[in-house]
Structures are given as C-alpha cells and as structure tokens.
Image: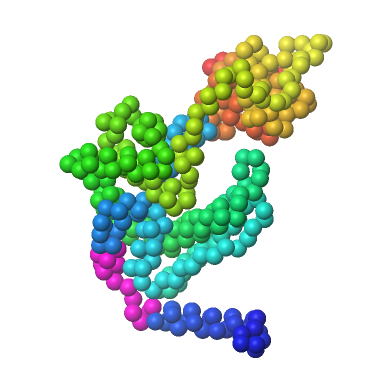
C-alpha cells in the first residue's frame, strides 16, 4: 500500500485501524446512548411524513413448496438508515466484494461500539437471466447497489435488537397505511403510483387477492405499499411481482424432457411398473437428472405396497420428511436422494400395516 509515493506496511495500517476503533469504543463507553432519546428521534424521523413512512417497510409475495402463497414483510433499508443515524455509538458500512460472472457478492458490517458487538453479512445476487446471459453493465451496477442495501439492512437489524425497533416500525406502518377515513384517497394514490410503472388495476387486485379495487382494505393497502417499496429498493422487480400469464395453448407448449420408466416383462408384483394412476412425472421439475436407472428406482418405490396403501409407517415417514400428508402426492415433494433413502427404509418384505 502506498500513500503520496510512500509505501505503508499492512501491519502499520492494521495498528492505525485498531487504534481508531479503540478510541471510538472508549468514547462510546464514556458517553453511552440514551434509549428514550433514540426511540423518540427515530420515531419522529420515520413518521415525519407519509412518503418517509411508506419507505420504512417492504412486502414480498412468495409461494412455498406446497403451492401456498405467503407474504414476507419486514423493515426496509430506509428504516435501517434511520436506526443507524439515531442509535448512536455505532459503525456501519457496506461494500462490493466479488463477481464470479454469474452472481455478485456484497458485504456489510455493523459494529455496536458500546456493547462491542460486530455483525458481518454477505448477500449474493444473480446477474444472469433465464437465458443464462449476463446482464448489461448498467443492470449489474443496479444489482450491486441492491445487494449492498440488503446486506446493510440485514447487518443493522442483527446488531440493533428488534425489541427496540418493532415499535418504531409499527408506528411508521400505521402512518403509511392510514385509517378508514383516508382509505379511499390512499387507495387511489396507490393505484396511480403502480400505473406509472406499467401495472394495471387488475394486476394490483390479483396481487392483493381481491375481486375489485373497492375490495382493497387497509391490510391489502399495506401489502401494496410494501411491495412498491421492495420494487424501489431492488428487492424484487415489476416482472417478478406481476408475472404475465402464459397465453400459449397447452398443445403448443413444449413437453418436459426426461424418459419414462419401462417395466421389465419378467418382474412380479413388486416390479418397477408404477401403480395405476401414478407416474414419475413431476418428481423432477424440467426432467433434470432423470435417466433410466433413476426412473426405475423411483418406479420401484411407487410400486411398493406401503406406498399403494395408507399405513402407520407411511405416516411416520411422511412426518420424518416434514410432508403435509401421506397420500402418494407427497412423493412428488422428495428429491432423488430422499427417494433412495425412503426406499432403504421400507421393509424389504413389503408387509403392509393397516392404517
């Protein structure tokens, strides 16, 4: 490392950095924070106006492995910035640390000097599309900025206990959403805001899971406000939040690859032929990693008497793999390693146990 043409040894830099941190810790101990003052100042900043309050929380819509829709809600990076500026005796920083061509990695640190608690968080974001092509440099830059924001938010809310933040968060959310008196006005404003980014009222209603605009209540309005914050902060995109329906006729859609298992001719009842109405379709999305040997293994499991008929042992296996039920459909939730483990746990004799 050089500075003004003079080479500086790394050990010297480390000693200087350590000395700076030691001084800051000593100062923090001498002038401890006032929690009442923190709550008051942070609340005033988070609720100073409707726009600021709206930026303090985000909402994402996700589908779990059972196909059920879940909403993920939490404090945003804007609220993290407010917390850092009012918490006192704290250091926070984020930086870009790597790019392997497929994804970028950003790192954030947050050090509470008073309690001497330091948190380091890394966040990865993909920089390739569905066609496996890398994004343009401008999009990569936006992705890096988004990853930096997410890493900083996560680090801050790990270093600062949520017990001190949840009340500020709730008050900001209440100011952003309003009440029944302001519902009509803010609902109209919300629709106008989404229209500016190309989202129709019908798409908004589909996201909120309501039949019409008039059915959007305070809870749905909160989800829509949080979603717009997530889009602005780069947590999601318009395309991800409002996917366009596939209008391709079913007959014209490409079939999923992957060979189907064929049952041996000389195999008895426990052959690799799946029971009636069952197949290996859907066990591997897109047909990835399926070959004849693996398909035969799966078919043998599907043909096992314990799989054909409900039993106490099947329920125990379903519980072990944390599955919803014990009907044959739950097999579709398992990957190949779990399927092979399941086969090894089935009684070799194929003895059925009545339910």
Q: Residue 43 location, x and y as percent? A: 27, 60
Q: Percent position (x, y) of residue 270?
A: 73, 15
Magenta residues? Answer: 28-43
Image location (x, y in percent) of residue 18: 53, 81
Q: Is residue 48 magenta?
A: no
| Residue drawn where x is 64% and y is 83% of the image | 2
* Viewer-nearest residue: 178 or 339: 178
| Image vertical order of residue 28 relative to residue 269, above or below | below
Can residue 352 be seen here? no
Does the segment drawn in magenta span residue 34?
yes
Colour setup of the view: rainbow
Determine the image quadrant of residue 327.
top right
> Is residue 27 in view?
yes
**Residue at the (73%, 29%) spot, across then down:** 290
Task: Report the residue at 65% width, 89% height from top.
Answer: 6
Query: What secondary structure characterizes most of the magenta part?
Result: helix
Judge by depth and name the residue closer to the eye, 163 or 345: 163
On the rendered image, what quadrant is the N terminus found in?
bottom right
Instruction: Look at 51% across and 84% down and name the residue there.
Output: 19
Residue 348 falls in image quadrant: top right
Query: Against 145, is 118 above or below?
Result: below
Task: Tell which of 332 and 182 is nearer to you.
Answer: 182
Does residue 278 lie above or below 224 as drawn? Answer: above
Total marks placed:
0
Which residue extends farthest right? 266
* Residue 232 at x, y percent in the picture: 42, 51
Horizontal side of residue 275 vs 193, given as left or right: right
């Amino acid at each position: 490392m050089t500075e003004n043409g003079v080479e500086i040894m790394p050990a010297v830099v480390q000693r200087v950095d350590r000395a700076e941190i030691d001084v800051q810790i000593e100062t923090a101990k001498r002038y401890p924070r006032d929690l009442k003052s923190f709550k008051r100042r942070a609340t005033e900043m988070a609720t100073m106006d409707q726009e600021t309050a709206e930026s303090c929380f985000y909402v994402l819509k996700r589908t779990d492995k059972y196909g059920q829709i879940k909403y993920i809600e939490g404090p945003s990076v804007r609220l993290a910035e407010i917390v850092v500026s009012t918490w006192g005796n704290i250091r926070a920083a984020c930086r870009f640390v790597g790019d392997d061509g497929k994804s970028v990695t950003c790192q954030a640190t947050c050090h509470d000097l008073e309690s001497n608690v330091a948190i380091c968080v890394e966040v990865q974001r993909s920089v390739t599309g569905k066609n496996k092509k890398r994004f343009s440099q401008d999009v990569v830059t936006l992705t890096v900025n988004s990853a930096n924001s997410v890493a900083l938010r996560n680090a801050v809310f790990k270093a600062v206990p949520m017990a001190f933040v949840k009340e500020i968060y709730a008050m900001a959310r209440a100011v952003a959403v309003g009440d029944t008196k302001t519902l009509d006005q803010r609902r109209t404003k919300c629709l106008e805001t989404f229209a500016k980014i190309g989202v129709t009222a019908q798409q908004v209603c589909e996201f909120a899971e309501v039949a019409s605009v008039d059915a959007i209540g305070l809870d749905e309005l909160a989800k829509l406000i949080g979603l717009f914050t997530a889009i602005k902060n780069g947590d999601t995109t318009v395309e991800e939040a409002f996917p366009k329906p596939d209008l391709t006729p079913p007959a014209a859609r490409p079939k999923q690859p992957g060979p189907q298992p064929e049952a041996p001719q000389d195999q008895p009842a426990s052959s690799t032929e799946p029971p009636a109405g069952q197949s290996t379709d859907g066990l591997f999305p897109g047909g990835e990693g399926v070959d004849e040997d693996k398909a035969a293994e799966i078919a043998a499991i599907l043909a096992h008497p314990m799989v054909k008929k409900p039993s106490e042992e099947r329920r125990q296996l379903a519980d072990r793999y944390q599955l919803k039920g014990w009907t044959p459909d739950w097999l579709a939730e398992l990957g190949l390693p779990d399927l092979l483990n399941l086969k090894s746990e089935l009684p070799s004799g194929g003895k059925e146990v009545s339910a």
